[in-house]
Amino acid sequence: MFHLVLYQPEIPQNSGNLIRLCACTACSLHLVPPLGFALDDARMKRAGLDYFERSSFRVEESLEALMDRAGEERFFFFSTKARRVYTEHRFREGDYLVFGPESRGLPEDLLRQFPDQALRIPMPGGTRSLNLANSAAIAIYEGLRQNSNWRSPAP
């Protein structure tokens, strides 16, 4: 499926929610330090419920190391500062969807380095930003929809 990358996440509940999302969508989660919480944080575990055992997540050495290891895979960087809307992009399975820390987003120099890979989620309400977990869910489900992987088997 897809790879969700949280660059320097700060809020444990968001990471817990995204562990759950990744388990439900068969995506993998990559946490890029420094983390604003401990992996055994009770708030993260509560948000992730019993999905920790069903999810694939790991703490990376750095974003650069992850990108080197991923080789030819594509990375897309989500930011309120990006010009291109995420629905204007065609996602492929195996893509890495990168989101920045809740308080400041991805570094501007990273967005300048990859301008064609920077995507935004429109916010017609004129607000500053969506919640990190909500933004990641929007991106993952758009990728699943585009690749016809959005149907789950009947229970």
Image (cartoon, rainbow, N blue to C red):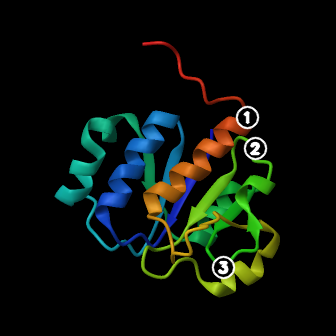
Q: Residue furthest top?
A: 154
Q: CA distance from mark 1 to mark 2?
A: 7 Å
Mark 1 vs mark 2: which is more N-terminal? 2
Residue behind mark 1: 147
Residue behind mark 2: 92
Q: Nearer the viewer, residue 113 or 130?
A: 130
Q: Residue furthest left?
A: 42
Residue behind mark 3: 81
29 vs 146, left or right, is left
x, y (%) of residue 131?
Answer: 44, 64
Q: What amino acid type is highlighted by mark number 1? A: Asn
Q: Residue at x 25, y 41 (%)?
A: 49
Secondary-structure class at tag 3: loop
Q: Residue at x 73, y 34 (%)?
A: 147
Q: CA distance from mark 3 to mark 2?
A: 23 Å
Q: Residue 152 sits in which quadrant?
A: top right
Q: Residue at x 41, y 69 (%)?
A: 9
Q: CA distance from mark 3 to mark 1?
A: 26 Å
C-beta proximity under 8 Å, tags 3 and 2: no
Vertical comparison of 109 with 30: above or below:
below
Residue 117's disc is: none
47 vs 9, left or right, is left
Vertical comparison of 144 with 38: above or below:
above
Q: Nearer the viewer, residue 105 or 95?
A: 105
Residue 99, visible in the rendered structure: yes
Q: What amino acid type is highlighted by mark number 3? A: Lys
C-beta proximity under 8 Å, tags 3 and 1: no
